[in-house]
Amino acid sequence: KQEVTQIPAALSVPEGENLVLNCSFTDSAIYNLQWFRQDPGKGLTSLLLIQSSQREQTSGRLNASLDKSSGRSTLYIAASQPGDSATYLCAVRGGGNYGQNFVFGPGTRLSVLP
Amino acid sequence: DAGVTQSPTHLIKTRGQQVTLRCSPKSGHDTVSWYQQALGQGPQFIFQYYEEEERQRGNFPDRFSGHQFPNYSSELNVNALLLGDSALYLCASSFAPRNSPLHFGNGTRLTVT
């Protein structure tokens, strides 16, 4: 059974800092991994999707890496801003049968202080 | 281009009642998945629909059922509501291929009293 953990559970940083969020998964037989952000009481916004054959993906100030063999992914946020404050979740999609569902981690709650 | 839309936004029900939640997928998407998110936790997979059939199911009881219509929209039905069913219910849509990303709606907040 796939299990996903995220460290730290919460993080508070001053504006302008670069930061790294961590995601670990127990079964390396994944198809892809997706990072999301969630604002309080809202749905999930897709940030980046990394296929199992890729090492990293970049979008603006965000960079996500994937090390499938070690079961780890990181989300790097450059020059953080107060608007980045949200909960960040990673989710992994397993290999195997068609349409394998995503398994989510519990999230990291990020606060960027002005 | 409309994203994933869910209705209603909020819902209050009494224990034992039944509820129906609705979802319209992002334009062009043909696969709909439903997730339950308890406060402070990550979403938990309920089931996935493609071509009007349930393709996969998570660890949820039969009280949870669904449907997908020919226009790809979907419904989630929960019977005999329990207090523990109180949660944010999220709908996600995607293209059928597994290499496509999930796109989520804003969810329906269900409170069972």
Image (tube, coloured by chain):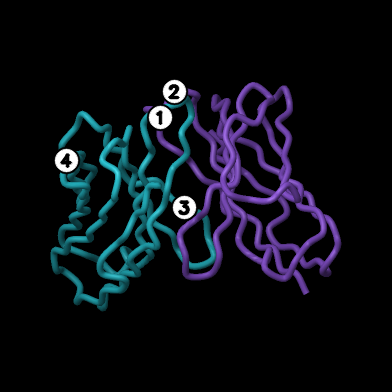
Chain colours: A cyan, B purple
Looking at the rendered structure, whether the residues under marks 4 and 2 are on a common chain is answered as no
CB contact under 8 Å: marks 1 and 4:
no
Looking at the rendered structure, whether the residues under marks 2 and 3 are on a common chain is answered as no
- Point out which mark residue A44 bears: 3
Identify the element where label 3 is drawn. Answer: strand
Q: Position of residue B87 (x, y in %)?
A: 62, 64
Looking at the rendered structure, whether the residues under marks 4 and 3 are on a common chain is answered as yes
Q: Residue at x 53, y 33 (%)?
A: B1
Is B8 left, or right, of A24 in this rendering?
Answer: right
- Point out which mark residue B100 bears: 1
CB contact under 8 Å: marks 2 and 3:
no
Mark 2 belongs to which amino acid?
Answer: Pro
Q: Is residue A97 above or below residue B19?
A: above
Mark 3 belongs to which amino acid?
Answer: Leu
Which image quarter is the C terminus of chain B in?
bottom right
Looking at the rendered structure, whether the residues under marks 1 and 4 are on a common chain is answered as no
Provide the residue designation for mark 2.
B97
